[in-house]
Amino acid sequence: MTAINLAQALNQALSDALAEDPRVLILGEDVGRTGGVFRITDGLQERFGSDRVVDTPVAEAGIVGAAFGLAVGGMRPVAEMQFMGFSYPAYDQIISHVSRIRNRSRHRFTAPLVIRMPYGGGIGAAEHHSESTEAIYAHIPGLKVVVPSTPADARGLLLSAVADPDPVVFLEPIRLYRAVKEEVPRGTHMVPIGVAKVAAEGTDVTIISWGAMMKEVRQVAERLAEEGVSAEVIDVRTLAPLDMGAAVASVSKTGRAVVVHEAPRTAGLGAEIVAQIQEQCLYSLAAPVERVTGWDTIFPLKRAEHHYLPDPERILSAVRKTLEG
Amino acid sequence: MRQILAPDGTLTGEAPFDLAETRRLYAAMVAARTYDRKGSSLQRQGRLATYAPLEGQEAAQIGSAAALRADDWMVATYRDAAAMWLHGYPWSLLILGRTGDERGGSSPEGVRVLPPSITVGAHMLHAVGLAWAERLQGRDRVAITYFGDGATSEGDFHEAMNFAGVFELGTVFLCENNQYAISLSRERQSASETIAQKADAYGLPGTQVDGNDLFAVFEATSEAVDRARSGGGATLIEAVTYRLGPHTTSDDPSRYRPDTEPDEWRDRDPVERVRLFLAANRGWDEQFEKETKAAATEEIDRAVIEAESLAPLEAADTFDAMFEEPTLPLLEQRERA
């Protein structure tokens, strides 16, 4: 088994899903001949044909609206939004129809579809290409929102998303597409949706994060270890439904917590997580819970984006603040 | 504009079906009007939430739905009860939906009618996807979608027509141009001379028919359905009609249209037109009229009782159709609801 990166793991998962289930098809802008802007669907049209890996017109509402019909009609579409920042034209389809059809038909019709969205900044991309607006999807009843941070989780969660009987928004951390490699078992290897993961065990402080920020969080945990501080790291992995079990168990043990996300601070998911920690383990807390987040600014362009993104220094200083408490 | 049956009930072309079928569809239009008036009346009594009357559009809906095969898909709107009913959606569920109950959106097994779309425009794409799903699964079911003149201004209309054109999908776009989108007149909705001509931009055939002519609507829809079923792609039909009532029970049409205008359209009434035709061809008499109306009234009254006898959803029930299995947060919240 050779080590593969997150992008390759997604490509393999899509390839396996297409091979295994004739109902699966991929549709999106440039997903066929060019294999998508990030090459996640590379080679799939060649292998499975243009009926199953479909290059669509440039129309995000069209892609998701058609995928909705395909799903209601018995298919398992995987729709690609080229960037999260380009998903908003499809937002009405997602919030008004995709998320609601099961409820408004009382289970008579369902929309089992996956909407993939590369998200996050840090690669010096153009405006609108660095969005991290996961909270606006996690806020919508009827949607599941998933975000992997490792190649193995990317594969396992994507296969679960394709198999899920309900719609899943699948966020892909652009910065991590090719950042790390690991061995990923082929064959059916699902990671359940709605289950957080303890990414590193520790006893002194809990750091809770997901997706692209997991890289910085892991670095911080290593640096803290060198200083003799044992940090437990929770990779939330599913933002809706949010699994607080692992985080609550961890904070009850450590008494200290830092939530890290790339999205803007106000009404970010960190707020929900902190609220739940407060509800469920207030009396275990030895210090106020800290948040390290993007600012409430428009994501800055290339030359200034480093001012926005939480870096290990900001995370470290937040951890130290909780340790002083 | 295609027309077969003139407002005075005389033929200007060839009737597309025989007298027996004409009588059946006349009875269907009478049932639709009975349902519709009942709907407005129940709303005034506080027994329905907002109601969107369809009076005046019976031929556009019944004529088009009659051209479908029983297993075809239908994606329609809040004003399309007549089309949905003819395609198998029970009156009782239509009423249940309007009482404010999600269970009204659950069509019986085998009836491929989506719950009526409340948002304007987005649903046209769903019919595109459904036709696509059928083709990919090697079946020849088509998908028809109903929408008004206002919906053609939405971006999703463009995207749906464009996808249907590019992928050559078996979708029938049926625009009920009823002259007003709430208060905005057709002329202010679009500078296009006709809605049908918009099809040109997508490489699709578009056709304008007298939407108050049962025969013309049926014929145009049959042609579109045949084209869709045989792999010939999508069609846009503009059925020119008129909403005789308000947009919904909560608006006042006198604020935006001349009071005399509905009377002018009454002279082109789609139901009366077929009655005149039948009467002139020994297909109608007072007895038939009486029986038809009595049967419709009885059927609708029964449906109202059926809908209203259903107990409302319990608090716990409102959590149960969010996902196939309720998620942990939903289970926790359901306990507290």
Image (cartoon, helix red, strand yellow):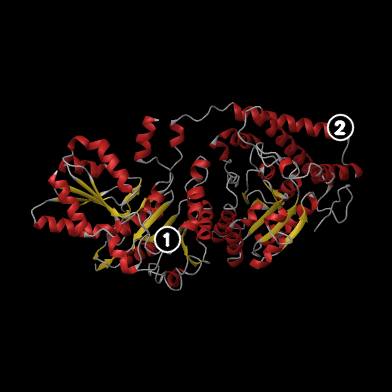
Looking at the rendered image, the quarter that the N terminus of chain B falls into is bottom right
Q: Where residue B289 appears, x then y in whole percent?
A: 83, 34
Label 2 Cα crowd, 10 Å radius (few <14 / some 14-19 / many 20+): few
Res. B221 visible in picture: no
Q: Where residue A204 appears, x then y in whole percent?
A: 13, 47
Amino acid carrying mark 2 in the image? Gln
Amino acid carrying mark 1 in the image? Gly
Q: Which of A23 and A308 is in front in this view?
A: A308
Task: Give me the C-alpha separation between circle 2 and circle 1.
Answer: 65 Å
**Count of labels in the image:** 2
Quick one: SS at disc 2? Answer: helix
Q: Is residue A92 left or right of residue B143?
A: left
User: Which residue was labeled with disc 2?
Assistant: B287
Label 1 Cα crowd, 10 Å radius (few <14 / some 14-19 / many 20+): some
Q: Which of A306 and A116 is in front in this view?
A: A306
Residue pictured at 74% horizontal, 33% vertical: B296
**To which quarter of the image does residue B301 belong?**
top right
User: Which residue was labeled with disc 1?
Assistant: A85
Q: In this view, does A257 lie to the left or right of A97?
A: left
Q: Mark 2 lies on which chain?
A: B
Residue pictured at 51% horizontal, 54% vertical: A68
